[in-house]
Structures are given as structure tokens and as C-alpha cells.
């Protein structure tokens, strides 16, 4: 990100954040960050293209800097790559200042990451995790994964005020291209599957390993007495191919040993066990399908497929889509908004009056250039 653009992004994001918190409070900011469309619109407003590299990471990074400087009652922890792994440390520091129970937030952060890495699998590997929390203890998470095979990213949004259960349809929204299938163990109607998964993970490790061999044998056409129902060879082979398209089928014996020792009683507890990763869950899930005839959901839960025509571009995009960033327009916009900020300190209704004016305005026909 060139300095000339990043510096302007900070100024514009600061004004937007200020206006929102003053008008809607910190809750208003968090619920907007949890909305995939609003987050994408902010991304486009400050000068990012709708699908440019760094859309999520740059916008989140800019917001983190702004929130740290402005002290509006919302803080951010985490980021991209190594910064995402610093989230627990940063959350403990933030919670210490706010008098919040830091460990519950660290646990929430870890569980959110585990759900989108392990419990929901569509070939995306997480590389960005940003945790926003306000002084009231409410939080929003924006995290993103990359699918190297198709070179596409997917963004996951979480909002504490909309979560009843971390492992039952917990997302505020998921933005990305919908896949033909995804291993979805957090769908609403697979409670029996989740219970069976927890029980199987605590079973004798040698027994689970035998069950995995049985499942693979079924896919090769072997008839076994252990399987709860006879599978057609083609059907079973297709199920195995679907799992293998997501990665390897390997059991982490240490993780399963720990699950047995800790006697995990819920899916949340199981996911938080160290070492229980995507390949182990795939292996356990295959056993449940082909040996015990208990099935997950294969519906991809994307809620917001990307649509560039939903968004308006105020100043252009850094990669030139739909047009290069116009520095003159950007500076005029910042100057105008800064004056509006000054005016609003003496007249709280000035922003509302400007909003009414802009809603009634439409661009001249000659300015409507197709993208």
C-alpha cells in the first residue's frame, strides 16, 4: 500500500468511525463491521477495489490503527499472519484496561478460528483474524481464509450479540464464492452428528483407527459387518473423494488421547483441543458417514456472494478498478468531511441534514460512466 494512499485512508476511516460512534454508539460500529456488505462498502469507500489483494487485511489494519489512536471505546486485536497469532496477548492487554475477563475473550477468539478452520471446511486456510471489542464487552470478529487451489479468498464475520451457540450456525455472514459443497458441521440440523462426533473422538484410539480402515475399505467395494448399512461402491468412493478433495484423512493420536483424557462433553470443547485439526475431523467424519451412517451437512453456508455492482466507488480503487484513485477528489472529500466534523460539534443535527441532501442527489447523466 503506497504511503500517499494509506495516509488518506487513515484520515477518511477516522472520520467515518467518529461519525458512526457519535451517532450509533460502539454497538453501532460493531454491528456494521459484522455486516459483510457494510464492511465491503467501507473497503471501497476508502480506496480499495472490490476484489483487490489486501481488501480485508488493509481495511482491518487501517481500522486497528484508527481505533488505537482515536480512543472511541472500541479496540482491535490481531491481524494478518504473525499478527493474528498475537491476538491472545493483545486481548489480554485490552481486557486488562477494560476490566473484562480476558480468558473468556481469548477462548472466543480461539474457538472462532477453530470453527472456520476445522468445523467448516471448503478448502480455505485462515491467514487473517481481527477481533474488535468495545468497553461493554461486545465483540465482532472479521477473519479471512485463502483457497490456494482456486486463488480465491473468503471472509467470515462474527458478532457476539447474534451468537447463541458457537457451533450452530454462528456466523453473522460469510462473504465469498459459494462452492458446490463444504464439510459443514455447524449447520442447524446436524445435532445428532455433532454428538456422535464428540463420542467417537473419545473412543478407544485403536478402535477409531480400525473404523477408518473399514470406511476406506467400504469405498473400495468391500462388504463389512461393521457398517450400519451397505453402500454401493460408487457412492462410497464418491464420498471418500469428496473428503480427500479437502485434504488428507489422518488421525492425530495425541489429540484423540487428550480428548479421551479430558472427556470433552461438547463440540466446543472438542474443537478447542490442541492438535485436533482439519485432517483429524475429516477422518472422524468419514467414519461417521460410512460406518455409522451419521452425516454432516454438505451445504456451503456462504451468505453474501461477492457482487461488485452493489457498491459505489467514491474515490476509485488502488488497482485502478473501476478507475484509479483520484487524489484531488480524495483530498476534497476529506476536507469537506473535516469541516462537517467541526460544524457538528456546535450543531448535532448538521450531519442528518447533509444526509437528507445526499439521499435526494443523483449524479448528472454525463458522469455515469460504465465500469
Image (spheres, rainbow, N blue to C red):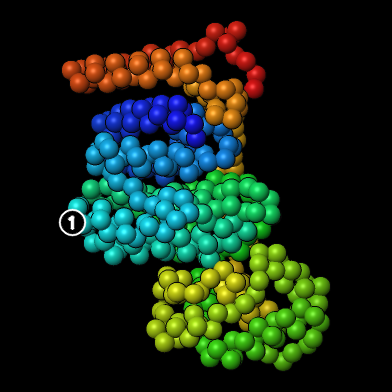
| Residue at (63, 47) in percent of width and height | 152
- The relative height of residue 94 versus residue 39 in the rendered view (above or below) is below
- The relative height of residue 106 versus residue 266 in the rendered view (above or below) is above
Query: How far across and how far down the image is residue 214, in percent?
Result: 70, 86
| Residue at (60, 26) in percent of width and height | 320
| Residue at (54, 84) in percent of width and height | 253
Query: How far across and how far down the image is residue 290, in percent?
Result: 68, 79
| Residue at (74, 68) in percent of width and height | 241
Q: Is residue 228 visible?
A: no
Q: Is residue 58 left or right of residue 278?
A: left
Q: In this figure, which residue is indicated by the disc labeled 1?
A: 99
- In this orientation, which residue lies closer to the viewer: 109 or 5? 5
Q: Is residue 174 left or right of residue 161?
A: right
- The relative height of residue 299 versus residue 357 in the rendered view (above or below) is below
- In this orientation, which residue lies closer to the viewer: 346 or 65? 65
- The relative height of residue 140 versus residue 125 in the rendered view (above or below) is above
Q: Which quadrant: the C terminus?
A: top right
Amino acid at each position: 500500500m503506497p504511503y500517499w494512499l494509506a495516509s488518506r485512508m487513515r484520515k477518511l476511516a477516522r472520520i467515518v468511525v467518529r461519525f458512526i460512534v457519535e451517532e450509533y454508539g460502539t454497538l453501532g460500529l460493531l454491528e456494521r463491521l459484522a455486516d459483510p456488505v457494510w464492511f465491503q462498502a467501507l473497503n471501497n469507500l476508502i480506496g480499495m477495489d472490490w476484489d483487490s489483494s489486501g481488501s480485508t487485511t488493509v481495511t482491518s489494519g487501517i481500522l486497528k490503527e484508527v481505533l488505537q489512536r482515536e480512543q472511541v471505546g472500541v479496540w482491535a486485536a490481531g491481524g494478518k499472519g504473525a499478527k493474528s497469532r498475537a491476538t491472545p496477548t493483545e486481548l489480554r492487554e485490552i481486557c486488562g484496561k477494560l476490566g473484562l475477563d480476558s480468558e473468556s475473550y481469548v477462548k472466543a477468539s480461539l474457538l472462532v478460528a477453530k470453527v472456520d478452520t476445522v468445523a467448516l471446511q471448503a478448502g480455505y486456510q485462515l491467514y487473517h483474524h481481527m477481533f474488535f471489542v468495545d468497553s461493554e464487552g461486545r465483540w465482532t470478529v472479521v477473519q479471512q481464509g485463502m483457497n490456494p487451489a482456486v486463488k480465491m479468498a473468503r471472509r467470515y464475520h462474527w458478532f457476539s450479540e447474534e451468537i447463541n451457540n458457537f457451533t450452530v450456525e454462528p456466523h453473522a455472514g460469510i462473504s465469498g464464492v459459494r462452492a458446490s459443497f463444504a464439510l459443514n458441521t455447524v449447520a442447524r440440523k446436524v445435532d445428532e452428528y455433532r454428538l456422535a462426533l464428540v463420542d467417537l473422538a473419545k473412543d478407544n484410539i485403536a478402535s477409531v483407527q480400525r473404523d477408518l480402515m473399514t470406511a476406506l475399505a467400504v469405498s473400495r467395494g468391500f462388504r463389512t459387518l461393521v457398517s450400519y448399512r451397505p453402500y454401493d461402491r460408487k457412492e462410497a468412493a464418491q464420498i471418500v473423494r469428496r473428503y480427500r478433495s479437502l485434504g488428507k484423512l489422518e488421525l492425530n493420536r495425541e489429540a484423540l488421547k487428550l480428548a479421551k483424557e479430558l472427556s470433552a462433553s461438547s463440540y466446543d470443547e472438542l474443537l478447542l483441543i490442541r492438535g485436533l485439526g482439519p485432517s483429524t475431523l475429516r477422518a472422524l467424519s468419514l467414519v461417521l458417514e460410512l460406518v455409522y451412517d451419521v452425516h454432516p451437512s454438505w451445504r456451503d453456508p456462504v451468505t453474501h456472494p461477492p457482487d461488485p455492482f452493489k457498491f459505489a466507488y467514491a474515490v476509485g480503487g488502488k488497482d485502478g478498478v473501476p478507475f484509479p484513485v483520484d487524489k484531488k477528489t480524495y483530498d476534497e472529500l476529506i476536507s469537506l468531511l473535516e469541516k462537517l466534523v467541526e460544524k457538528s460539534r456546535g450543531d448535532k443535527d448538521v450531519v442528518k441534514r447533509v444526509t437528507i441532501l445526499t439521499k435526494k442527489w443523483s449524479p448528472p447523466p454525463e458522469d455515469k460512466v460504465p465500469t
